[in-house]
Image: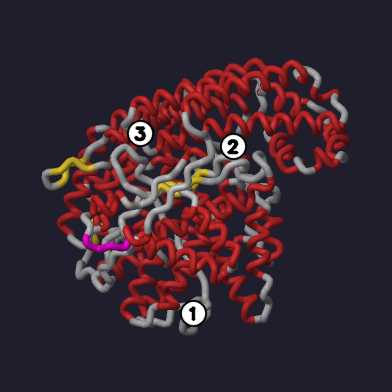
C-alpha cells in the first residue's frame, strides 16, 4: 500500500486556548510506512525471507573466490553486496525507529530483538566478503579500481582496507559477528529500556526523563533545584545497573581492540572517523587550554546576572533574567528554521520542507519515547527520520534546526549510495551545527531590542560551551574511565569521582557542586551507544565556526560561490576525507590554528557580553537581515 502522508493543520497548531496536553497531541508524529508498509509484521517477514535467499545465493557464488574475480565481476559482486545490506538496513531502521517511540513497550522490544537477531544471522553469510577483500593483494585491488564500476566504490574500499591490519582470523570474526546481538547490542538495549522505565518524583507527580530534564530549564530556581535533586536520587538508585552496563561495554571494547592490535583506546574510533590521532589531540588540547578564557569566564558573568556569588550546578542551563519568556508554536518554529535555511541557499529550504510535508518528523513528547533528539539516515532508497521532543522553547527551535541540518545533509548525500552516503562522525555534525548557526544569526538580525539581542548572544555562547567545552569534558571522562577500566571494574562511586573532577575542571570555580550531581554520568547515552563519539560535536562546532568566518570573508570579497560549495560538501557524503572537503574553503583541520580560530569566535562573543556591546556579529558590525550563522543542542 502507498505510504500514508499525514499533515498537521496549521489552524489547530496555532490556537492558544488549548491545554498543554492537547497542543502536544497536535505535534507531528512520524509515518514509518515509507520504510515498511502496513501490515508491518507481514512485510518484515517477507523482506527477511527474501534477503536470506539473496545472502545465501551471494555466499554460494562468491565465498573463497573473491580475490580471483575480474574487475567487472567484482564490481557486480560489490553492487549486489550493497543492495543486500541496504535491504537489511531498511528493515533494521524500521524496528529501531519503532522502538525509539515505544521503549516501555515489551512488544516493541521483542520485535526489535527478534528482527535484529534474524538480520545478524542473514548478514553472517556476508562476513566472508569483507574478509576476503582485505586478504586480496594490493595489485589485485589496483586492478579492480581501474574498472568504472569499482572505481566509484574507492572510498568505501579504502576504508574497509584501513582495518586490514586489525582483522582477526575468519573463524574468530564470524564468531564475534554471531555473538553481537547478545553482546554489546544487548547491553545497549538494557540501557535504553532501563532509562525509559525510570520515573522521577517531582511535586507529587512521577515524571519521565524528558519531563524532569525540562524542569532544569525552568525560570523557577526552586523547581530547578528540586528537579536536579530528583534526577540525582533516581540515578543514584540505579547507578549499580548503569555502572554494570558501562563497565561491561568498556571491557568488551578493550578485549576486542586488544586482540585486534589497536594501540590506544581512541585508535579504532579515530580510524573509523577517518581522522588522524594528532588532529583529535590538537582539538581536545586546544579546548582544555581555553577553559579559563571561555567557560570559567562566561559562568562568572552568568552568576553576576543571576545575582549570585557562585552558581549552583542546577543553574548551569537556567534562563537568564533578561531573557524573554516566550513560547513558540510548531508552525512558528518551522517558519523560523526554513526561512533561515532559505536565506542561505534555497535548496536547503526546499529539502528541509519535505520533512514537514511528509511526516518525517516525530516531535510529540510522550511516555516511552526516547528523551533525546536525532536524525536517523535509514537508507538512501527511503529518507531520514527526525525524532525530537518539542516543548515550545527557543532551545527546541535550535534542536529542530540542528536535526533538520542532519536531515538535509542525509537527503543531499543519498545519491552516493548506501555505503557512501554517511559521513564519518567528525563531519556528521557539520550540517547540523551550521543549520543552528543560520537560525541564530537570522533571529539576531531580526531582533531590534538591545536586551533581547544580548539574551540571544548569551544563549548562543551557552550552546557553544555545551557543544565544545562540555563535549570535550565528556570525552575526557570517557578516556579516563576506559583507561582505568583496563585495570579492573570501577564502582559507581569511583565513576562519580572521575565525573566530578572533570566537570569541575571544565566548568570552573563559578560553580558549587553537590552530591546529587555525582551520578549524572549515568544518563549520557553516548557513553553506552557510541564510545568516544562526543568529540565529534566539538569538531563540528569549531569547524563550522571556521567555515562561517570563511563565508563572511568571501562575502566581503564579493565571492558568491560559498553557498554552492557548501551544498557540494554536503552532497559528497562520505566520499571525501575532511582535508579534501575543506580545501575549497581554504581550511585545514590538521593545522592547530584551525581550532584556535574556531574557539576565538566563542571568546569574541564573551568579549562582547562583558563589554556590554549589543552589535553582535562576527565582523563587529550591526547585524544585517541577510546575515547567517549558529548553534548545537548539546546533551543536558
CA gap between label 1 and label 2 equals 45 Å
Displayed quadrant of residue 484:
top left
Is residue 89 visible from the viewing direction of this image?
yes
Residue that mark 3 sits on? 103
Q: Residue at x 60, y 61 (%)?
A: 592
Q: Nearer the viewer, residue 625 or 466?
A: 625
Q: Which element carries disc 1, helix, strand or loop?
A: loop
Q: Residue at x 31, y 28 (%)?
A: 241
Magenta region, residue range: 13-17
Pick out the residue farthest to the left: 204
CA gap between label 1 and label 3 equals 43 Å
Q: Residue at x 40, y 40 (%)?
A: 525
The number of discs equals 3
Mark 2 vs 3: CB contact within 8 A: no
Q: Which mark is residue 370?
A: none
Disc with the residue nearer the chain's start (1 vs 3): 3
Residue that mark 2 sits on? 268
Give percent across and percent down for residue 31.
Answer: 45, 42
Residue that mark 1 sits on? 625
Disc with the residue nearer the chain's start (1 vs 2): 2
> Of helix, strand and loop, which mostly describes the magenta segment?
loop
Give percent across and percent down for residue 347.
Answer: 60, 63
- Side of 47 relative to 110 (left or right): right
| Pair 1/2: label in front | 1
Give percent across and percent down for residue 626.
Answer: 52, 78
Amino acid at each position: 500500500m502507498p505510504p500514508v502522508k499525514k499533515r498537521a493543520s496549521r489552524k489547530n497548531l496555532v490556537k492558544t486556548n488549548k491545554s498543554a496536553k492537547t497542543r502536544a497531541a497536535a505535534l507531528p508524529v512520524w509515518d514509518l510506512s515509507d520504510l515498511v508498509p502496513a501490515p508491518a509484521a507481514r512485510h518484515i517477514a517477507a523482506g527477511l525471507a527474501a534477503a536470506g535467499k539473496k545472502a545465501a545465493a551471494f555466499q554460494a557464488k562468491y565465498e573463497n573466490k573473491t580475490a580471483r574475480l575480474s574487475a567487472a565481476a567484482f564490481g557486480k559482486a560489490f553492487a549486489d553486496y550493497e543492495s543486500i545490506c541496504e535491504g537489511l538496513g531498511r528493515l533494521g531502521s524500521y524496528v529501531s525507529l519503532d522502538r525509539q517511540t515505544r521503549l516501555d513497550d515489551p512488544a516493541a522490544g521483542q520485535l526489535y530483538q527478534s528482527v535484529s537477531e534474524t538480520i545478524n544471522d542473514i548478514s553472517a553469510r556476508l562476513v566472508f566478503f569483507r574478509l576476503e577483500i582485505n586478504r586480496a593483494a594490493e595489485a589485485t585491488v589496483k586492478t579492480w579500481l581501474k574498472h568504472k564500476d569499482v572505481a566509484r566504490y574507492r572510498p568505501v574500499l579504502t576504508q574497509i582496507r584501513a582495518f586490514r591490519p586489525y582483522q582477526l582470523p575468519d573463524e574468530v570474526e564470524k564468531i564475534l559477528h554471531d555473538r553481537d546481538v547478545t553482546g554489546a547490542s544487548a547491553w545497549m538495549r538494557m540501557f535504553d529500556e532501563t532509562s525509559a522505565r525510570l520515573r522521577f518524583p517531582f511535586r507529587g507527580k512521577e515524571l519521565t526523563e524528558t519531563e524532569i530534564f525540562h524542569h532544569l530549564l525552568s525560570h523557577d530556581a526552586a523547581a530547578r533545584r528540586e528537579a536536579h535533586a530528583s534526577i540525582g536520587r533516581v540515578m543514584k538508585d540505579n547507578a549499580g545497573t548503569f555502572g554494570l552496563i558501562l563497565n561491561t561495554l568498556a571491557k568488551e571494547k578493550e578485549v576486542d581492540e586488544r586482540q585486534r592490535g589497536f594501540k590506544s583506546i581512541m585508535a579504532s574510533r579515530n580510524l573509523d572517523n577517518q581522522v588522524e590521532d594528532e588532529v583529535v589531540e590538537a582539538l581536545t588540547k586546544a579546548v582544555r587550554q581555553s577553559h579559563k578564557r571561555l567557560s570559567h569566564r562566561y559562568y562568572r558573568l552568568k552568576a553576576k546576572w543571576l545575582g549570585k556569588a557562585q552558581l549552583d550546578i542546577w543553574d548551569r542551563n537556567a534562563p537568564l533574567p533578561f531573557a524573554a519568556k516566550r513560547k513558540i508554536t510548531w508552525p512558528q518554529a518551522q517558519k523560523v528554521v526554513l526561512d533561515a535555511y532559505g536565506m542561505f541557499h534555497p535548496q536547503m529550504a526546499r529539502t528541509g520542507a519535505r520533512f514537514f510535508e511528509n511526516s518525517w518528523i516525530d516531535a510529540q513528547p510522550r511516555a516511552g519515547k526516547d528523551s533525546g533528539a536525532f536524525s536517523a539516515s535509514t537508507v538512501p532508497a527511503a529518507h531520514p527520520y527526525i525524532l525530537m521532543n518539542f516543548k515550545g522553547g527557543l532551545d527546541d527551535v535550535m534542536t529542530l534546526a540542528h536535526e533538520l541540518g542532519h536531515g538535509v545533509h542525509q537527503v543531499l548525500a543519498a545519491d552516493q549510495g548506501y555505503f557512501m552516503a554517511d559521513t564519518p562522525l567528525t563531519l556528521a555534525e557539520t550540517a547540523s551545527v551550521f543549520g543552528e548557526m543560520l537560525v541564530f544569526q537570522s533571529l539576531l538580525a531580526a531582533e531590534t531590542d538591545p536586551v533581547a539581542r544580548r539574551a540571544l548572544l548569551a544563549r548562543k555562547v551557552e550552546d557553544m560551551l555545551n557543544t565544545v567545552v562540555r563535549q570535550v569534558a565528556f570525552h575526557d571522562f570517557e578516556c579516563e574511565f576506559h583507561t582505568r577500566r583496563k585495570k579492573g571494574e570501577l564502582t559507581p562511586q569511583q565513576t562519580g569521582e572521575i565525573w566530578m573532577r572533570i566537570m569541575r575542571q571544565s566548568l570552573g570555580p563559578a560553580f558549587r557542586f553537590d552530591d546529587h550531581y555525582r551520578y549524572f554520568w549515568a544518563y549520557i547515552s553516548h557513553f553506552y551507544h557510541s564510545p568516544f563519539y562526543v568529540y565529534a560535536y566539538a569538531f563540528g562546532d569549531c569547524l563550522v565556526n571556521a567555515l562561517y568566518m570563511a563565508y563572511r570573508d568571501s562575502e566581503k570579497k564579493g565571492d558568491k560561490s560559498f553557498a554552492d560549495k557548501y551544498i557540494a560538501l554536503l552532497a559528497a557524503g562520505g566520499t571525501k576525507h575532511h582535508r579534501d572537503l575543506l580545501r575549497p574553503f581554504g581550511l585545514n583541520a590538521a593545522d592547530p590554528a584551525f581550532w584556535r580560530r574556531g574557539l576565538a569566535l566563542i571568546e569574541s562573543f564573551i568579549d562582547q557580553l562583558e563589554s556590554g556591546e549589543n552589535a553582535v556579529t562576527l565582523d563587529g558590525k550591526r547585524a544585517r537581515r541577510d546575515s547567517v550563522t549558529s548553534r548545537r543542542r548539546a546533551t543536558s
